[in-house]
Every structure is written in C-alpha cells, then in structure tokens.
Amino acid sequence: MNASRLRRACWNNSLTEHRTQQARENLARLTGLPRTRSTRQDRSSASPSRPSESSWQINNTAAQSSNDQRALSSRAPYLDDLESAKIEFSCGGKTHSQLTFWYRGTSRAAGQDLLLFVDDELYDVYGETPNWSWVESSLVVPTGTHDYRWEATTDKAGRPPFWIDSIRCIDTPIATNNNGRFDLDDGFVPPELEGNWQINNTAAQSVSDSNAFGARAPYLDDGESASIEFDCGGKPHAQLTFWYRGTGQAAGQDLRFFVDDELYETYGETPNWSWQTKVVNHGGGGSHRYRWEATTDTVGRPPFWLDSFRCE
C-alpha cells in the first residue's frame, strides 16, 4: 500500500463517535482498504484473567527466541479478500506515558499491511521487518489514558504475516528540564514541547542505540501542516542547536523553520538521509520561540524528524 494515500494521524486529539466513524470511512476511501470487520467488543480491562475477545490468535508460531519455542505471541488470522482483523489494547485504562511492543512482519504480499491506530487516529503502517526478525517499537504519548488498535489488512484471501508480542505500558513522571538539553528519551512528552508531532524510536540517530527517540511528523491530509513548538522553557539563551533528518521527500513536502514567528529556513532531504546538526546563533541572550512546520500537498506523512534540542 502506498503510504502517501493514508490519512492524517494526530494522536493527541480526542474524537467524537461521529468523527471516528468518518475517519474510518475516509481511510477506506483513500486507501481502498476494507472497512474494519467488527469481531469483538471494546476492551475495558487488560487483565490476563479475562478471555480474549480479539480475532487475532495467540500461539507459539513465532517465538522471539529460538531458545524458548514455547513463547507465545499474537498472530493475525486467515482473512477473506478485502477483510481486516484487529486487536485492541488500552493498558487496562491506566494512565501511562509510553507504550512499547514487539512486532514481526515476514513475507508480505501486495495489499497486506499492519495499521496502528492511537485513539482512533492512524499512527503508523508496518510491513516486513528486517530479516523477518522481531523489532521493538516504542511510542511516547501525552500522559493519560489511550486506546490502541492494530489492524491487519489484506486485498486477497490469506493470512497477513504479522505478529505482536510483549506489550508494555510505562508511566514515567513528568519532570521539568533544568539543563537545557532535550533528547526526547525521558519516557514522557516534555512539557516544554507543544504540537502534534509523534515521539517514537522509528529513526534512531545511531544503529547501536535503537531505543533512542526522536520527534516525527504525523500523517496529514493534502494541504495540511503539523507543527512542533519550543521555547527552551522560556529561559534566555544565545544559541539553539538541534538534530534534523529528512528522507524520501516528495514534491510539495517541506519542513519550514520559524524563529520568533519569522521564517528562518526551509529544509528538505538530508544527504544520504542521515542526521545533521543545525545551529541558530542569536549573538546575545534573550528568550526566543521556535516552530517547525511540516507541510504536504498530498495525503501522506512528511518524512521529517527532529531530535536533541540544546539551549545554550
């Protein structure tokens, strides 16, 4: 499935039931995917003592370790053509600031995808994992309660080749930053950051540190934009540095950077799609406000990441 035909994901907005249904209808229209087959009631508790109501299957067909062939995981079931199956989770309704889970995708056929929704908004789309191995996915979300839904889809009859395992809900207390270094690795959304970008581990700066987090632009409708704002906690500073990454940029996709509401620079792809350091020197002290605005002329996710803000 072409990711540029997916609709917007803004996980920090709570939708009414009417808007939720409209979102599902729009997703089906934009992607050609089937409307979700209702196979279960909404989960009100994550207690393991409750019987599973999900249409996914739990078995040992894909143990995370060859040393533990009895390990169980959740696997997408067989589906008819143009059907989907979902598994839902809400951390038992408990407050949390981070969700982690392990994911595996093997030999994926055209039209087979795994969609993750957070609070009924599309958050990400998964396909095959490298070497068909297990990969840990971590999301930092606004502290509170959230609902998660994984939907396996297929355009033709068969079993989507996806597994989910080891779901963890973590509640890290919010702390105010006192050193001017914001690495987004603290396990909560920093109160100094505002906006609707996503914080996750999808583009770690180092291969050896796959658990490093960065801020990523969300899915957007055509002609829309998403911003992230930052003011160093209101503290005076003479210089701002940050890390930036741009990958497969399409026409009409840009990242605009504003300083004190004035356009400072426009970014696109970075060389070799690698991370780069950007520096803004004010030549003196004072307080300043920064805004990064990802834009797109077509439905999709602008391919931009930000990380490691420094106020000096």
Image (spheres, rainbow, N blue to C red):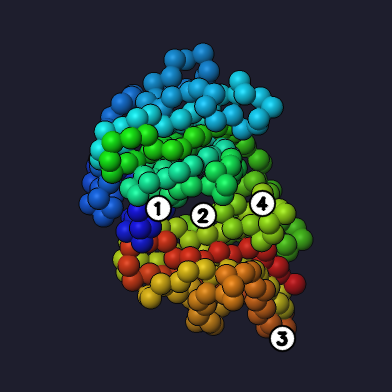
- Earlier sequence position, callout 4 versus callout 1: 1
Task: Check the image and report above or below for 34 versus 277.
Answer: above
Report x, y in % for residue 265: 53, 82
- Earlier sequence position, callout 1 versus callout 3: 1
Q: Amino acid at mark 1?
A: Ala
Report x, y in % for residue 176: 69, 52
Foreground residue among 206 and 226: 206
- Earlier sequence position, callout 3 versus callout 4: 4
Q: Residues within 10 Å of mark 1 (few under 14, many from 20)?
A: many
Residue furthest to the bottom in view is 283
Q: Residues within 10 Å of mark 4 (few under 14, many from 20)?
A: some
Q: In the image, 130: left or right of 41?
A: right
Q: Amino acid at mark 4?
A: Ser
Q: Which residue is mark 3?
A: 283
Q: Which residue is mark 2?
A: 198
Q: Are dots 2 and 3 in contact, CB under 8 Å? A: no
- Earlier sequence position, callout 4 versus callout 2: 2
Residue at the spot x=72%, y=62% of the render? 181
Q: Amino acid at mark 3?
A: Gly
SS state under label 1: loop
Camera-near label (2 vs 3) is 2
- Earlier sequence position, callout 2 versus callout 1: 1
Picture quarter containing residue 311? bottom right
Task: Check the image and report above or below for 201 versus 95.
Answer: below
C-alpha separation, residue under disc 4 versus residue under disc 1? 23 Å
Residue at the spot x=53%, y=40% of the render? 104
Q: Which residue is mark 1?
A: 9
Query: Which mark, residue 240?
Result: none
SS state under label 4: loop
Query: Which mark, residue 210?
Result: 4
SS state under label 2: strand
